[in-house]
Amino acid sequence: MLWEFTVARASSGGTINATMLTTMSTSLHYRAVEHLGTRIVGGKLPTGHVMLAEHLEDELKVSRSVVREAVRVLQSLGLVETIKRVGIRVLPAHRWNPFDPLVIRWRLAGEGRGAQLRSLAELRSAVEPVAAELAAENAPESLRSELVDISLAMREAGRAGDMPTFLDLDIRFHALVLSGSGNEMFANLIGQVTETLTGRTVHGLMPEHPKEAALQWHLDVAQGIRDRDGDKAREAASNIMRETIADLSPDWEGQPRVFVPVERR
């Protein structure tokens, strides 16, 4: 089915950047991208820093072709630009692609974790309740049934403290809500939500046992979508995000925001 294809595609990242990484000929490319990407996003290579391809060859112990491919990926993410007869220059944060799952993953792993969590939580708060309401109106019947089954399995895994299983189910749940909305732009946020949920677990920001209220709200979303009750689905999704923000807000206290310059036309 179309929605199944959408979930599979979008949860993998849904961007050309993720595709680039998965089609690289060797793991050397991947390691080069990870090494440079994490250092740029983490601030070890600051804005304006210039790198030379020959120096990167020596530093990374890779060939020029590997460096070129890694730089091509970083350029597609907005992290660097190449300047003829100058080198590879690191770009400021407002030039990065904030929607790319790789950038999100690297930000969550660094000192900017709080700011990244805030941006993602605010994005999800704006989108997911609307997506839930739209899914109640538009989702295929098979998706509606699966959401209820997943929410019940989430409650079981959460109560048991089986967090790996809970994470897998949680990712699938939110992917289905976004896809079930019938809005392809919402569906293409699945990769970003996946990185958020995964990052919270990897970095120890999830409780050992999810709150009972949160488990019930997931079930309420699923039941609202199943029963075509858009108000119920939207309210429950809003409750989930309000609770998420309340839990995470201490992590971003004092973290600066990124203000993207608006060009005059």
Image (tube, rainbow, N blue to C red):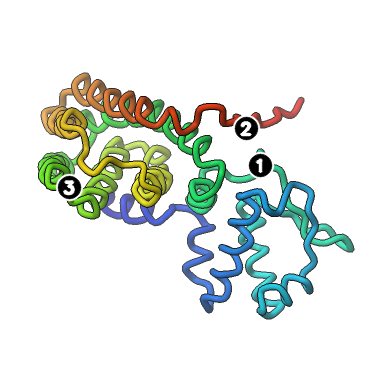
- Please say whether residue 265 is visible from this viewpoint: no
Image quadrant holding the C terminus, namely top right
The residue lying furthest to the right in this view is: 85
Answer with left or right where residue 56 lies relative to residue 130: right
Identify the mark nearer the N-term, 3 or 2.
Answer: 3
Q: Amino acid at mark 1?
A: Ala
Alpha-carbon distance for marks 3 and 1?
37 Å
Question: Few, some or many C-alpha atoms within 10 Å of disc 3 (few <14, some 14-19, many ≥20)?
Answer: some
Q: Residue at x 61, y 61 (%)?
A: 73
Secondary element at tag 1: helix
Question: Dividing the picture into quarters, in which one does residue 88 lie?
Answer: bottom right
Answer with left or right where residue 15 lies relative to residue 169: right
Question: Few, some or many C-alpha atoms within 10 Å of disc 1 (few <14, some 14-19, many ≥20)?
Answer: some
Nearest-to-viewer mark from 3 and 2: 3
> Residue 258 got which mark?
2
Question: Few, some or many C-alpha atoms within 10 Å of disc 2 (few <14, some 14-19, many ≥20)?
Answer: few
Q: Is 111 or 176 nearer to us in this picture?
A: 111
Alpha-carbon distance for marks 3 and 2?
36 Å
Q: Residue at x 70, y 28 (%)?
A: 262
Q: Which residue is mark 1?
A: 93
- Please say whether residue 195 is visible from this viewpoint: yes
Whole-percent x, y for residue 127 in the image: 38, 30
Q: Amino acid at mark 2?
A: Val
Q: Is 175 or 210 nearer to us in this picture?
A: 210
Identify the mark nearer the N-term, 2 or 1.
Answer: 1
